[in-house]
C-alpha cells in the first residue's frame, strides 16, 4: 500500500471512530454523574470533538467499525461458583479489529504541553509526518501507526510549541495493513506506556476504560 494512502486511511478511519466514541461518551455522561471522567473528573472542561476527514480526489474515505471485544471475568469471591468442563476450555479467539485505537489522557486540566510532547515523542522515536501528526515508520519508511491530538483538527503545530496544549493523544493502528501485526502491536503498547510515564497520563482503551492487561492480551491473541 502506498505510504501516503496508508496515512490517509489510518487518519480518516481512526478519527471518524473517535468522533463516534466521544459522542457516545457525552450521551452517557448526561445520564449518570458516575460516568467516567474524561479529563481527570473536571466537569467544566470544554472538550472539542475531533474532526478530520481527508479525501482522495472527490472520494472521501469511509470509516470502518471497530470490532466489539467482550471480556468475561470470574469473581473469586463468588462462593457459588463451581467450575465445570466448559469453564476449563480456553476462551474463543476474538476477531481481529480493523482499527486498534487507544488514548492517553492528561491528568491535569491544562493538558500536555507542546514542548513536553516533542521531547517525549523523540524519546520513543516517533516522527512528525506530512499530515502534521506523529508516526511510527518501519524500515521502508511506511507507517505502522499514528498519533494525533485528541481535539480538532487532530494535528500538532511545528512552531510556538511552548504555547500549545493538548488534552490527550489518540493512538491508532490498522492491523490488516501490516506484515507483522503482533510485532507492531507490541511496539505500539510499549510506546504508549513509555509516553504515559514521560507525560504523566492515563491510558484508556477503545471503550474509554483504563487499559488492562486482559484487554492487551485479548487483542494480541487476535492478531
Image: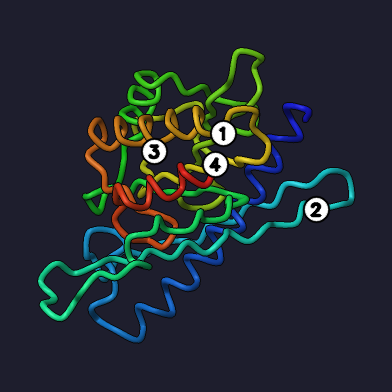
| Residue projecting furthest to the front | 85
Who comes first in sequence, dot 1 or dot 3? 3
Residue 220 is situated, as x and y percent measured from the top left of the image, at: 45, 42
Who comes first in sequence, dot 4 or dot 1? 1
Who comes first in sequence, dot 4 or dot 2? 2
Asked if the residue at tag 3 contacts the one at tag 1, i.e. Cβ–Cβ closer than 8 Å, the answer is no
Asked if the residue at tag 1 contacts the one at tag 4, i.e. Cβ–Cβ closer than 8 Å, the answer is yes
The residue indicated by pointer 1 is 181
Kind of element beneath mark 3: loop
* Mark 4 vs mark 3: in front: 4
Q: Residue at x 43, y 65 (%)?
A: 70
Kind of element beneath mark 2: strand
* Mark 3 vs mark 2: in front: 2
| Residue projecting furthest to the right | 58
The residue indicated by pointer 3 is 164
What crowding class fits label 2: few (fewer than 14 Cα within 10 Å), some (14-19), or many (20 or more)?
A: few
* Mark 4 vs mark 2: in front: 4
Who comes first in sequence, dot 1 or dot 2? 2
| Residue projecting furthest to the top | 139
The residue indicated by pointer 2 is 60
Q: Quarter of the image for the N terminus: give it.
A: top right
Identify which residue, 68 or 150, lies in the foreground.
68
Q: Give the image quarter of residue 42.
A: bottom left
Amino acid at each position: 500500500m502506498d505510504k501516503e494512502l496508508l496515512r490517509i486511511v489510518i487518519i480518516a478511519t481512526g478519527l471518524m471512530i473517535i468522533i463516534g466514541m466521544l459522542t457516545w461518551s457525552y450521551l452517557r455522561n448526561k445520564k449518570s454523574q458516575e460516568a467516567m471522567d474524561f479529563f481527570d473528573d473536571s466537569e467544566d472542561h470544554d472538550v472539542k470533538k475531533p474532526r478530520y476527514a481527508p479525501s482522495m480526489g472527490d472520494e472521501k474515505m469511509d470509516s470502518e467499525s471497530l470490532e466489539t471485544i467482550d471480556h468475561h471475568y470470574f469473581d473469586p469471591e463468588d462462593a457459588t461458583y463451581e467450575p465445570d468442563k466448559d469453564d476449563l476450555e480456553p476462551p474463543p479467539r476474538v476477531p481481529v479489529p480493523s482499527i486498534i485505537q487507544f488514548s492517553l489522557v492528561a491528568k491535569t486540566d491544562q493538558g500536555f504541553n507542546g514542548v513536553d510532547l516533542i521531547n517525549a515523542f523523540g524519546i520513543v522515536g516517533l516522527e512528525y509526518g506530512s499530515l502534521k501528526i506523529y508516526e511510527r515508520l518501519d524500515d521502508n519508511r511506511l507507517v505502522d501507526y499514528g498519533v494525533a491530538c485528541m481535539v480538532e483538527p487532530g494535528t500538532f503545530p511545528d512552531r510556538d510549541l511552548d504555547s500549545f496544549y493538548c488534552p490527550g493523544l489518540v493512538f491508532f493502528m490498522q492491523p490488516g495493513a501490516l506484515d507483522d501485526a503482533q510485532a507492531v502491536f507490541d511496539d505500539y503498547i510499549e510506546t504508549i506506556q513509555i509516553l504515559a510515564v514521560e507525560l504523566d497520563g492515563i491510558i484508556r482503551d477503545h471503550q474509554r476504560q483504563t487499559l488492562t492487561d486482559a484487554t492487551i492480551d485479548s487483542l494480541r491473541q487476535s492478531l
